Image (cartoon, coloured by chain):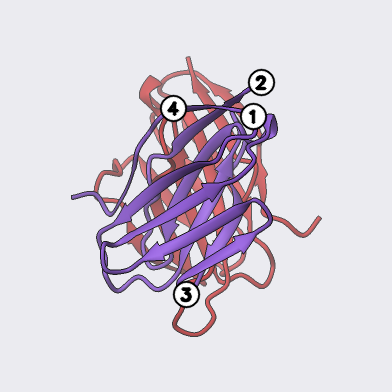
């Protein structure tokens, strides 16, 4: 099993929709988790850090489910500018998930 | 600019040549990571340093790749005898080591390598 796994997508959603993706992790000892956003041919940029059960920042909510070992990212009221690839990482692991591609359409 | 800095931003080289990339991390960060990324894939871990010590190196990494961080500040990644399959974006990231919880890493803009 890979250390971190993500559904590659793409998730195609209309503007204004709510979309969620999950990231499963293999190491139950992980205590911190990160979602990064990556635009095409750019470097990953930190979107959100999760150190407890979850975190919320505006339209973005991350939830941690330790029992099932996954972390989710929820985006409400999707904007065209949210189109990107979303990468997840557990803090104590060196690998990233393969990324989930989101495309928000007008 | 106090972010992670990588040089060069782009490198085109002929197959068989050696190339070296440099990464300057955020100054107070003692952890430094190298990743490689190809289109449509997530970043692939190559190696990481805590201060000057190279603590882990990917088992998938060819012995043509070597990295150093001699004074615990900047790092270099060298690829010897480049192959076309080495064409990728090489990303450097850094993070602080604080307590027992691993914190987020911050990335440089990457070095895009094209081997022709």
Q: Which of A64 and B52 is in front in this view?
A: A64
Residue at 60% of width from left, 31% of height from top? A83
Discs 2, 4: same chain: yes
Discs 3, 2: same chain: yes
Q: Nearer the viewer, residue B18 or B77?
A: B77
Task: Assess whether mark 2 and mark 1 are in contact (beta carbons under 8 angstroms).
Answer: yes
**Which comes before the other along the chain, label 3 or label 2?**
3
Helix, strand or loop at mark 3: loop
**Which comes before the other along the chain, label 3 or label 1?**
1
Q: Is residue A57 toward the left or the right of residue B104 in the image?
A: right
Discs 1, 2: same chain: yes
Q: At which x and y percent is residue B6?
A: 65, 45
Numbered disc total: 4
Residue at 69% of width from left, 33% of height from top? A81
Cα distance between the residues tagged 1 and 2: 5 Å
Q: Mark 1 points at which residue?
A: A15
Discs 3, 4: same chain: yes
The furthest residue to the left: A1
Task: Assess whether mark 1 and mark 3 are in contact (beta carbons under 8 angstroms).
Answer: no
The furthest residue to the top: B116
Neighbour tally class for label 2: few under 14, some 14-19, many 20 plus, Cα within 10 Å: few
Cα distance between the residues tagged 3 and 4: 28 Å
């Amino acid at each position: 099993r890979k250390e971190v796994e993500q559904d590659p997508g793409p998730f195609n959603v209309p503007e204004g929709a709510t979309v969620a993706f999950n990231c499963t992790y293999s190491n139950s000892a992980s205590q911190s988790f990160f979602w990064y956003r990556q635009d095409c041919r750019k470097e990953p940029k930190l979107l959100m850090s999760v150190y407890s059960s979850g975190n919320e920042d505006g339209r973005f909510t991350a939830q941690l489910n330790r029992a099932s070992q996954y972390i989710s990212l929820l985006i409400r009221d999707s904007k065209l500018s949210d189109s990107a690839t979303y990468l997840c990482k557990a803090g104590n692991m060196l690998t990233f998930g393969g990324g989930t591609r989101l495309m928000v359409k007008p | 600019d106090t972010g992670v800095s990588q040089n060069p931003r782009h490198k085109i080289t002929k197959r068989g040549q050696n190339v070296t990339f440099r990464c300057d991390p955020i100054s107070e960060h003692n952890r430094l990571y190298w990743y490689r990324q190809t289109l449509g894939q997530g970043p692939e871990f190559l190696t990481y340093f805590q201060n000057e010590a190279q603590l882990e190196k990917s088992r998938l990494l060819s012995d043509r790749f070597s990295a150093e961080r001699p004074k615990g500040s900047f790092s270099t990644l060298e690829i010897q005898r480049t192959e076309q399959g080495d064409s990728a974006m090489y990303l450097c990231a850094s993070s602080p080591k604080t307590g027992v919880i691993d914190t987020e890493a911050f990335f440089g803009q990457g070095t895009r390598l094209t081997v022709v």
